[in-house]
Amino acid sequence: MSFPGFPSYPPPWGPVAADPGPIPLRPLSAGDLLGAGFGVVRRHLALLGPVSVLIGVLSSAVSLGILAGTGSLTEYASGRWLDDVMNGATTSVPVPMLVAATLGTVVSVVGTIVVSGLAAACAGVDAMGRQSVPGALRERLAGRLPSLLLTSVLVGIAISIGLALVVVPGVLIYLAWALAAPAAAMERATPGTALRRSVRLTVGHRSRILGMTLLIGVIAFGIDVVVTSVIQAAAASMTAVAALVLSQAISAVLAALTTSWIGAVIALLYIDIRVRAENLGPALRAFAAADRTRPTGGPALGSA
């Protein structure tokens, strides 16, 4: 069996060779995915962190900008609109708030998918034990960013629209296309090919993808709530708008860890599923061994 971007190797009949890098090339448990995800973030925070913070800033800027532009920021920050809904004074959420939440969510979802693609490249470098990490990442991502970005936009918009349509369609779209961005980054796939590749890879694994996504989402949300609540309590003397802006800023900074971690776990799911379904482990080990022996500055094996 052959794998896009890697040479074909038969499965090993003897003892399995040691992993060339810190990513275990075997089926991963939930605990393995969570721990290895933190490892990817720790080793590549210089890349994943700033991108994740930028996504958090853009998402907050879009939401707060719409609220401020429509004169709804103070009402939203004070929570008066929520009191009106709870008390029955109104039966619907104000339109500006719906628009702000929707567009902010689109930016956040698209950004998280981009991070999962970047994290896949980082995890691939780790899995092969590459020593020159910055150079290896540039090599891995060369020419692939346009496809990764377009794939992420398509998937993010589709998921956001699906979530707006009674949630379920968005979940189904996510489960089918969750691995499209890692495929675009790792396999030099065009957006259409990456989407089809994700659909094929996720078959038989979607319940596991859903479970892991819910788990890491709950953990990341809990971290965000605890930290922002502590900061807001310490800034109780602030106005409602100032407190809202502060909480959004803190959430954007926390995204350096939380969004990076979510993206890393999704990227590791991509590698894990290929290890389970396509016996990728031996191919990566052989690729890593050949890569260590190639002349410095020579073409990277499997980089096409």
Image (cartoon, rainbow, N blue to C red):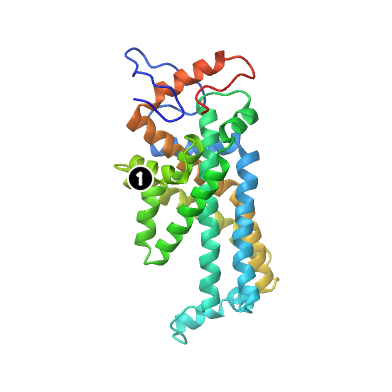
Residue 299 vs 137, above or below: the answer is above
Question: From the viewer's perspective, is residue 22 above or below residue 188?
Answer: above
Quick check: can you spot residue 179?
no
Instruction: Write the residue at 48% across / 78% down.
Output: 93
Q: Nearer the viewer, residue 158 or 304?
A: 304
Read off the residue under disc 1.
Answer: 199
30 displayed left or right of 149:
left
Q: Position of residue 37 (x, y in %)?
A: 50, 38
Determine whether 284 is above or below 106 in the image. Answer: above
Instruction: Name the residue rendered at 42%, 66% in the picture.
Output: 164
Q: Total of numbered circles in the picture?
A: 1
- Quadrant of residue 144 within the rendered picture: top right
Three-letter amino acid code at the position of disc 1:
Val
Q: Measured from the top left, where is residue 42 in percent x and y? A: 59, 36
| Quadrant placement of the N terminus | top left
**Residue plotted at (60% across, 49% down):** 52
x, y percent for residue 186: 49, 35
Which of 188/258 is in front?
A: 188
Furthest residue to the left? 204
The local secondary structure at tag 1 comes to helix
Which residue is nearer to you in this view: 185 or 277? 185
**Quarter-wise, where is residue 193 in the image?**
top left
Q: Choose between 141 and 246: the one closer to the eye.
A: 141
